[in-house]
Image: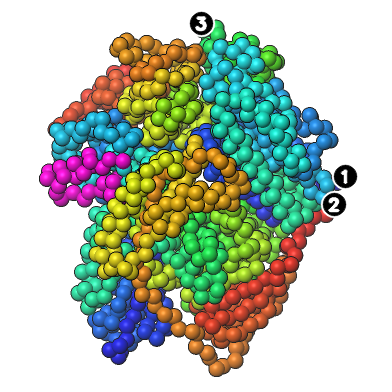
Amino acid sequence: MAARDHFDIGIDVGGTFTDCVMIDAAGRSFVEKTFTTPRDPSEGVLAGLEKLATKANAPLADFLRCVRRIVHGTTITTNAVLTGNGVKTGFVTTQGFRDVLLMRRGVRENQFNSKIDPPPPLVPRSLTVTVAERVDCVGAETVPLDRESARRAIRDLKEQGVESVAVSFLFSFLNPKHEAEIAELLKEDFPEAYISLSTQVLPQLRAYERHSTTALNAYVGPLLDRYLRRLTERLEKAGFSGRLLIMQSNGGVMAPETAARFACRTLLSGPAGGPVAAIFYGGRAGRGDVIAMDMGGTSFDVSLIKAGEASFTTTGDVGGHAMAFPVLDIRTVGAGGGSIAWLDDGGVLHVGPASAGADPGPICYGRGGKAPTVTDADLVLGYLGADDFLGGEFRLDIDGARKGIQERIAAPLGLDLITAAEGIHRIVNATMADAIRLVSIAQGYDPRQCTLVVAGGAGAVHAAAIARELGITSLLIPREASVFCAAGMLLSDLKHDYVRTLSGELGTIPPEKIAVIYADMSTEALHTLAEEGIGEREAQISYGVDLKYVGQFHEVTIPFASASTDVERLKSDFAARHLKLYGYNLPGQPVEALHWRLTAIGRTERPRFARAASVSSKPAPTKRDVVFDGRKTSTDVYRGGELNPGASFEGPAIIEEPTTTIVIPPACRLAVNEFGDYELTLASEQAAPTIAAAS
Amino acid sequence: MNQPHCDPISVAVISNRLAAITREMGQIMLLTSRSPIFSESRDFVTAIFDGQGRLIAQTSYIPVLLGAIPFALQAIRDRYHGKDLHPGDVIVANDPYLGNSHLPDVTIARPVFYRGELVFWAVTKGHQADLGGAGVAGYNPEATTVWEEGLRLPPMKLYSQGEYQRDLWDFILLNVKSRHLVEGDLHCQIGAATRGEEAVLELLDRYGWDAAAAAIEAYIAATEKSMSAAIKKIPNGIYAGESFLDNDGVEMEKAPGIRVAVKVEDETLTFDFAGSDPQTRGFVNSPFANTASVCFQALFACIGAAIPINFGSLRPIRIVAPEGSIVNCRAPAPTTASTLVTCAAIAEAIWIALAEAIPSQTQSGWGRRCAPMSAGTNPRTGRRFVCTHHNCKGGSGATEGYDGWNHTGPVSNMGGSRATDPEIFELAYPYRLFEYELAPDTGGAGQWRGGTGAVLRWRVESPDVQCVTVGSGMLEQTRAFGLFGGKPGSLPIMRVVGGDGASRKLPLNQFSEVKEGDVFELVSQGGGGFGDPFMRSPERVRDDVVNGLVSMEKAAQEYGVMLERRGREIVIDRDATAKKRAARTKA
């Protein structure tokens, strides 16, 4: 290893696998997967680094000294919420309003099913304490904080053994005084507690959503804090002296110290590398309007990217608890390789949302799975090769898959095996296409104008068929498709979102008030970035405001250019956006502002990906029977490594990569671009699949 | 003509797509509404019908609207007889005597043409903030005819062949009090129907009419089969149930009664309402469409949670309601409270009847709605407001194996609507909220406890507020019932404390005069319990006490669980509990 060698590493800890991507100084990328170690995920991280060190041909300590940056995505916070294993948390709120957090706005998600319990509370009622204090809806203090009752509440929680305390008072975002006072008392009387204040976590309107986000932060904060301390220690001991950065749900990264204070920002970070990667891979192929899809074993994640910009939402949900911090707008549906095909009482075929998961998994895994799944259908249809799965490490049981589909689906429906398998394939594709419609058409965008960027182990098997369903003609399958999120993490910038609430009709809010909140937010932003090593000059600041017509209850975030607001411009941008989103607008009607947002970005140094190297040997495809549109077709099967940049041919064909398979149907053209990514083009006038309908 | 044959895969793909289209329509409604009634209370439904007026797919965001639109669409089709309908038409209707339920629920229908033929309808129905009349938020308890309740709209065109019909828009908007809300929300409904039209046309372009029609036939037949199979699991027999309302707003001393006989014969099920009280003078009358919708709702909540709702699944269900009765009123009886209030009594009568037939699937009564509706001027904004007080939710009824949910009602919504956020409540309305939390000891005791109600207190901070109380549940025979030894939910409390400190109870279904400075005090009703409370596990009772949802006294009296405080801990006195529980068994 030469002294000038350096490496950037992305490590994504998922439920089953820990994905690692490394880029060296020459821009070459290396991919490794290790098993996740749920008891202490830092072990899996170290194991992944060991493997990468071996690839770099160096002892771990020497190797780590040359690592400039490790970007780390972790789902430990998400898992803690989903399994109810966060820390014992107390919640302090306004007297008279003890249950706003617990009531979850009185919603029962499945109205017709009474045989179900509500999600377990983050904080039980017995650990929710109230304090006499009140601020009214314009921010005036109407009841001062009763310090005695506050001290009692703190003592109560301390005696009950909580580790963490969340505080969220009504309208505290308009007047943070009482939360600041109680924070002082907590420091005096209960200094060992982890403290989460709504005025610091998410100072915005809507009590339940703010309470819930603040409580989530408290519930997982100490866990993430401990984990990151352990990881940092282990890395330092092993010789790492570069920067560790943590992935956030908004597609940005942050320093471990920031993450420990704002742990809730990691709660939906699992798939967050996806859109970032899609922007990058789309961008280098010259595509700005992109739909990112990631199809794994149990779920399908999809998000929309317009002109290189991802979309965000503030209506996140973790295990039935609201998470209102801005997160990438990624929709998830229960459709994946493990999705189970089944017949209802009326004999209608369904696929998913139940999944065979990884264990027992599909029938063809031979681990005791009995229910036919999407992967079984893909195998029967020849899309997957029994001997080629996971680079041939793992032989698939095609006879078992055939038998399962035959007995459970084909025979009861009176269909032949192939038609039934193709049916399973089509139904799951249609479900995924519907998910794509919800993020595109139902938000005012035409998916046909977009490129589908494909990720996940099962993604490239289904992508062309999904594209055909939607009229999408352009697809891009990055070579790192199977470790897509880890690759995205390497490409993420430091990013911090801030919000303040100042409501009123546009044009009547005094500009100086707006200036004050922006001064406040940018001070906080620049301070955080400075801690992360980004100077004021390098920081990029952008602005947005949530607008609605007076009387509406749903806001639309409109970006604007600088902290000085141009009201007329905002109004016309809002009117145009409303028309685009919802098919109408109301010219001349008053517009109301609610939340004012600031996003601060500190650019990280991007690793440079090298162009793909050429191989000299001529590709020598093998053949296998693959079913397209009901017909068995003898199809060329290529190994991923044997195609050079510039290679191009017409389907049908299959490309086997070590961790994914790319299905290229007939009338679909493949081209390998200069980076080694696969670009597919479907003929736009291609006819819809024919359906047998006889009178 | 032979039924076209269709392969099972296309049936699944096309039917899934049609259901997804109604969800896309719903998403547009949620995102574009102006009044919180759509975006927060989700008081709307989206649907696709075929050219023959059969319901093909729908998404009902609250249960009471589950079966409400087929009747409205039928009336629209009858009006036009297949003539005078063109691409680009948008039809509006709300008349309870032409297939609707109550005036605020407005139906918007778009006929969809494919190659010159009317092949589908894209329809939405939703609760508009205001449709005129002398009431508050549409609720006028003094009305004795539908004309006093608001504006009746027979089927008419808001757009004709794509042309905005200014005459009709001007006419409607001139007759409503909250023009800015109604205009926006009509557009919101039309936008959703327009998306429905586009989407079904895309579907036809992709698959062709013949294939789509064949898939729809097969899908309807399959859904009917699912429903028939579910009904077949109910033992044959005739099961009776009865339930009441407190009053009709006009005759205050009479509690109108609803009686149902649920007749199960193999694969068909009949709801027969013979013996129900005659229609009332006041606004609690249920038009046939509403009664039918609630029957479907109550049944699906017991046996059909997983069955899609369409013409096929509704076909094995018959509804017989005597004309001129409270469950099938004749014009011009007033009907506004039918969805929110009468709905609960109809559903409960059915659940009581089904308790004999399918005891493990039925459920106890939900906390009835018992709350004001209010409107007026908000001095802070200078604008008119309409508030439906959806934050006054009661607890849900318990069922075998599961406690009721806290603060989730009423039955018409079954947890489908979100309670107004307390901060939004203060910002949007001239009210200062002092208290909003769960009310201990309100859920009916049972092996499975009824959900807990909530306590709310707020002060009026405007000189211009009109208020109507709407609901039921204040009487012994109307409180949320328990089943199989479970106790009923608490009686609700609804009163106003004036500036002078004097407190007065608010009678149900009346206009109430409120002054600036008055403080409302409400305790919503808990749900009914299920099963003998002495069978409840002592650990669950203790947890409820630790969490302050049940008091120590009630734990002893109603559950026979003896607890004691040891320092911070509350522990079960096993011996005393066993003794207490055994003593009752002997007695």
Amino acid type of the residue tagged 1 in the rendering? Met
Spatial separation of the CA atoms under disc 1 and disc 3: 59 Å
Magenta stretch in the rendered image: A174-202
The mark lying in front, picked from 1 and 3, is: 3
Residue B253 disc label: 3
Residue at 39% across, 68% down: A492
Residue type beneath disc 3: Glu
Q: Examine the rendered structure and indicate whether residue B145 appears above or below residue A112.
A: above
Residue, disc 1: B1
Quadrant in which residue B106 is drawn? top right
Q: Which residue is mark 2?
A: A695
The chain holding disc 1 is B
Viewer-side label of 2, 3: 3
Q: Residue furthest right?
A: B1
Determine whether, in the image, residue B565 is placed left or right of residue B135. left
Subunit ID for the residue under disc 3? B
User: Please, what secondary structure does the residue beneath circle 1 have?
Assistant: loop
Q: Chain of mark 2?
A: A
Residue shown at 69%/65% (left/top)? A418
